[in-house]
Image (spheres, rainbow, N blue to C red):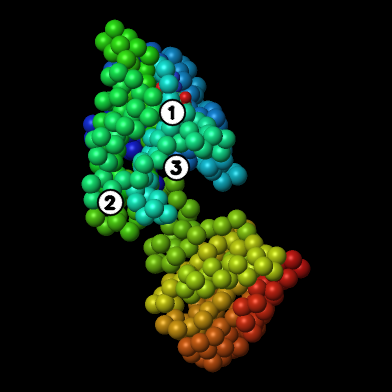
Amino acid sequence: MKIHEHQARQILADAGIPVPPGEVITSSEQAAGAYKRVSAASGSSLAVVKAQVHAGGRGKAGFVKLVRSDQEAAEAARFMLTNRMKSPQTPPEGLEVTKLLIAAGVDIAKEYYLAITTDRASRRNVLIASSEGGVDIEEVAHRNPGAILKRPLHPLMGLQAHEARSMAFDLGFKGKQVNQAASIMSKLAQVYGSLDCALAEVNPLIVTPPDAANPDGRVLAIDAKFNFDDNALFRQPKIQAMFDPTEEDPGELRAAKSGLNYIALDGNIGCLVNGAGLAMATMDTIKHFGGEPANFLDVGGGATEEAVTEAFRIILSDGAVKGVLVNIFGGIMRCDVIAQAIVNAAKEVGFEVPLVVRLEGTNVDAGRRILEAARSQIPTMQAATDLADGAKKVVSAVRAA
Ligand code: GDP
Ligand code: MN
């Protein structure tokens, strides 16, 4: 599960990591007031308006804007709330922006990258850091991988103080910055473990220019991104409460309510399959014959007729779907349940697009009889003898249509 930057900043602040204060707004009329309060609290006219969406790359897309007056804040807010945010991390059509963070702006002397994630190869959590942080970290990883430092963490001891300090030295922090940076790393590691994170990223972690009170500058987090382990959410009620359904694919939300494993994809062939392994094999086979799956959908073993009918509703409500392949190898899932759900969906929504059905396994004869009896109501339906036959048929039917 992902959360918004403003929620991530709150988690950091609660853990004692210094973060500039801010306010969330949902309309451009609120921008001037929020700007005035934020700048009064920070004692600086510099503020930053930031789109709150579950994707990065906002800076380069124009959705992180430095402002120095209430008018500039309102103007930036209007732009962000009336344009879609497009970056390499969003779908091509971009994301709608409905919430903005107006945060106190800071002057930046240098930007760093800091993250903790789980590294499957070493089977440990790993601290990742770079002195070349900011908006181009992917570029740095590509051009100069040596500039990205990694330290695997001990499974029981976590990040130890001396390791954090040595990372701070390796990153080039100087003087009083070292303790500040090391303490931020330790607190981030603590948060990572205690909140069951899958990713805790601060990019950039910054150092402010020196001033009289802080001759070495201050180390602050000014952007944060968290991802949580969905399987641990049951014991993280505070994180669960941060869930924002407006950031999720509507089909995926509906599917989750019916206990279906559904993931929307970019292609045009809707798939309804039982079992995650078979679903992946089905997608591979469709691709092998030159098609593109529109979704991954595993109805699982124990799904009811109503849940499977809902699965068809979800698939057929996706305007990109130009054909549907049903591939069922009935074990716990019974073929007659699937067949009845096809008939229900045909009655309710209608299969205007080609439908190819491959049924095998438990109650297959009953399933075939149900489909045969309803054949006249589902004129676009074809039967397939096996998976390859089904994939070929649906790919060519979609091409022909
Ligand atoms: P992202 O592009 O979605 O990762 O958004 P960030 O919050 O990381 O902002 C992108 C960039 O904007 C940062 O790397 C900074 O260079 C700049 N930026 C963000 N906040 C501030 C700020 O308060 N002051 C200054 N000077 N620059 C900022
Ligand atoms: Mn960032």
The crowd level at tag 2 (other Cα within 10 Å; few <14, some 14-19, many 20+) is few
Contact, CB < 8 Å: mark 3 with mark 2? no
Q: In this view, does 318 lie above or below 395?
A: above
Check disc 1 and report its element: helix, strand or loop: loop
Between marks 3 and 2 in the image, the one whose residue lies nearer the viewer:
2
Q: In this view, does 385 lie to the left or right of 49?
A: right
Q: For ligand 1, which image quadrant applies?
A: top left
Relative image position of residue 73 (x, y in whole percent): 45, 21
Q: Nearer the viewer, residue 217 or 281?
A: 217
Q: Is residue 101 left or right of residue 17?
A: right
Check disc 3 and report its element: helix, strand or loop: loop
- The kind of residue on which mark 3 rests is His
Instruction: Give the alpha-carbon distance from disc 1 to disc 3, as whole Å.
Output: 25 Å
Q: Name the residue under label 2.
A: 155
Contact, CB < 8 Å: mark 2 with mark 1? no
Could you tell which of marks 3 and 2 lies nearer the N-terminus? 3
The disc label shown at residue 131, or none: 1
Q: Name the residue under label 3.
A: 54
- The kind of residue on which mark 2 rests is Pro
Q: In this view, does 11 lie to the left or right of 370?
A: left
Residue at x 40%, y 40% (from the top left corner): 150
